[in-house]
Amino acid sequence: MTKITTFRDLLVWQKSHQLTLFCYKITSNFPKNEMFGLISQTRRSAASVSAKIVEGFRRVSINDSIRFYIIADASLEELKYHLLLAHDLEYLQSNIYKKALLLSEETGKLLTRWIQSQKKRKLNS
């Protein structure tokens, strides 16, 4: 088993970072009138998932860490809505939306497992 020494070692962070990069890429094709609307909101919520994982990783107390991971999960749900809205507004083709949703769901599963592992760690400490 590999020792986790930095947030970059976390599989959940790696997946969320892939998702963030993908969201930046796909939103570059949105209408320019969405620059301060849906583009900004989608990018912000995507980046927030990864950023909150990083913040949680550096917290001293396990309770603080878990709180940040839960906030990351909420940002992920917000991102899923922005992606759905973009799809419904026909800014995203179905195949791109499905890929973004798949990345979101994979990130969510990893995040759920990470939170559970941290809660278990808390109980065992």
Image (cartoon, helix red, strand yellow):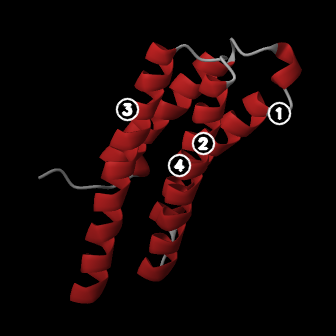
The location of residue 114, given as percent across then percent down, is 32, 61
The answer to whether the residue labelled 1 contacts the one labelled 3, judged by CB atoms less than 8 Å apart, is: no
Mark 3–mark 2 Cα distance, whole angstroms, equals 14 Å
Q: Is residue 111 above or below residue 95?
A: below
Residue at left offset 44%, top offset 33%: 101
Left or right of 122 in this view: 85: right
Residue at the extreme front: 88
Within 10 angstroms of label 3, few (less than 14), some, or many (20 or more) residues? few
Q: Name the residue carrying label 4.
A: 76
Mark 4–mark 3 Cα distance, whole angstroms, equals 12 Å
Q: Name the residue carrying label 3.
A: 102
Q: Name the residue carrying label 2.
A: 81
Residue at the extreme left: 1
Residue at left offset 36%, top offset 47%: 12
SS label for mark 1: loop
Mark 4–mark 1 Cα distance, whole angstroms, equals 18 Å
Left or right of 107 in this view: 51: right
Indicate the amino acid at tag 4.
Answer: Leu
Left or right of 88 in this view: 60: left
Residue at left offset 25%, top offset 78%: 120
Q: Which badge, 3 or 2, comes first in the chain's sequence?
A: 2
SS label for mark 2: helix
The location of residue 5, given as percent across then percent down, is 33, 55
Indicate the amino acid at tag 3.
Answer: Leu
Indicate the amino acid at tag 2.
Answer: Tyr
Between label 4 and label 2, give the one nearer the viewer: 2
Q: Which badge, 1 or 3, comes first in the chain's sequence?
A: 1
